[in-house]
Image (cartoon, helix red, strand yellow):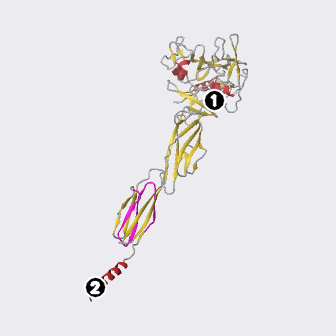
Amino acid sequence: MNMKKFLSLLVIGALALTACQPEPVLTLSKTGLEFGIEGGSQVVHVSSNYAWNVIPSNNDIRVSPTSGTVSGDVTITVPANNVPEVKEFELLFVCSNKDQSSSQTLSIIQHGAMAEWLVDIIEYNPPREGRHFSAEGGTAAITFESNAPWTLKCLESDVTLDRTEGEAGRYTVTATVPACPVFEGRMINFEYKATGKSSSTGGSFGFNQDGGVIVYGGETYHAAQMKDGNWWMIENLRYIPTGMTVSSDASAVNAGIWYPLVIDELNEEKATVKFSTDAADIKANGYLYSTEVVLGLQPGAMNVSREEVEKILDAATGAQGICPSGWHIPTKADILGLVGKTADKNDTDPTAPYYDPDLNGGNGSVALLNADGFNAGAWGAVSIANTAATKGTTIGAIKTYQEGMNTGYVAGSSPRQVTWNDDGTLKNIQFIGLMPNMNMGTFNGAWNNYRNGVSVRCVKNK
């Protein structure tokens, strides 16, 4: 064989060898991966007949290894997604020989983070400052945003929501809150949850509701802790005992409960009062009660033997009476501890927080009480002298005080004096209550005939 023929055969052989090289083939065990908001790692198997490498489209994704000469596993690691938007990535796997190449795309999707439930807007009705509900209750508009279907609930069973679930979006849910059932106040807690395709998030938030209110007999009362350390009602009682009828007749001496008194006529010539059945006056002044009713008894319950009267009086001081559970009718000790004085000159406590030694020689002070929210005032009274009286009189206004009611009584539970008729029947019982004199600005302990119709303030038990 000559040299020329030999070289021709070599060229033909080389061309034949090149023509026989297989085409590049690369396959992936998965063509797509899905990650949750927390990220993580997943494995894809690469099958290739040539060397291969990976071309990422995002620098945050870690690929190990990024190349290989044979088939093998590749670990793809995606960091957590801290934004609400969904993220999409691609990885390009490529293998090739001298003249050809093959590639496969691996698609990656990562879900967005759930929107944080930070309450944007709280609008209260009645309006309030700060993020808390008033003691009286009301409504609150809670505005929030979620990028996934959501649920919302309140852990307090007496709080209602006008909507408890929805799709992704911005919402305002109205929470309706009743008067606080816990005197000391409470925390109202809400729980939410947002659920996406592959993950969910949840949390809670809460608001305080003020205390200092009592819900009793269908009425809501406010109370304040005074400087004597006691919680006192700062509204007069508006409770109607079962089976009793409110009277507007001062001659109804056995009624036991009367409507409030208001000014009828007040000028330099005349000062009179009258009963009012108006709801606003009842709300402002409360009803007037005999001490029998105040102590939880029926009118006439003390028209019994001396022995039975003494038993009633032994149990009277500090009795709950018609007050709510956990409260009592003020005692002499409560009164002295508050204002420092009664009508007995020996009953003086100058250390009492609302005693003013400079007020007319030393008296309990309306101004000092009201500076701390006691709402001291005068609401009049039905005056019934004793068991022999067949007619009462209304009191409360005087011509020398033109600003409104001047006097009245607040019931007390401590007996002061019992008097008897010659035949041994009961004549009268005086209890130590509170008496305002608005023209002098005083609020002291005083003697109250047990049949009188007077206002009621309750004191919380310690």
Q: Is residue 130 visible?
A: yes
Q: Residue 157, percent across and down?
A: 57, 44
Q: Is residue 344 left or right of residue 297?
A: left
> How far is disc 2 from disc 1 in space, using C-alphas?
136 Å
Q: Secondary structure at mark 1?
A: loop
Q: Is residue 266 above or below residue 38?
A: above
Residue 29 placed where, x, y %? 43, 68
Q: Is residue 141 magenta?
A: no
- Residue at x 64% of width, y 34% of height: 218
Q: Horizontally, is 193 left or right of 220 in the view?
A: left
Q: Residue under label 1, please give it.
A: 296
From the viewer's perspective, tell me whether residue 321 is left or right of residue 254. Answer: left
Does 320 sit above or below residue 114?
above
Q: Quadrant of the N terminus?
A: bottom left
Stretch of the chain drawn in magenta: 29-58
- Provide the major secondary structure of the magenta segment: strand
- Give the amino acid at mark 2: Lys
What element does badge 2 sit on? Answer: helix
Q: Earlier in the sequence, mark 2 or mark 1?
A: 2
Q: Is residue 32 magenta?
A: yes
Residue 128's quadrant in the figure? top right
In this view, the residue in front, 427 or 253, is 253
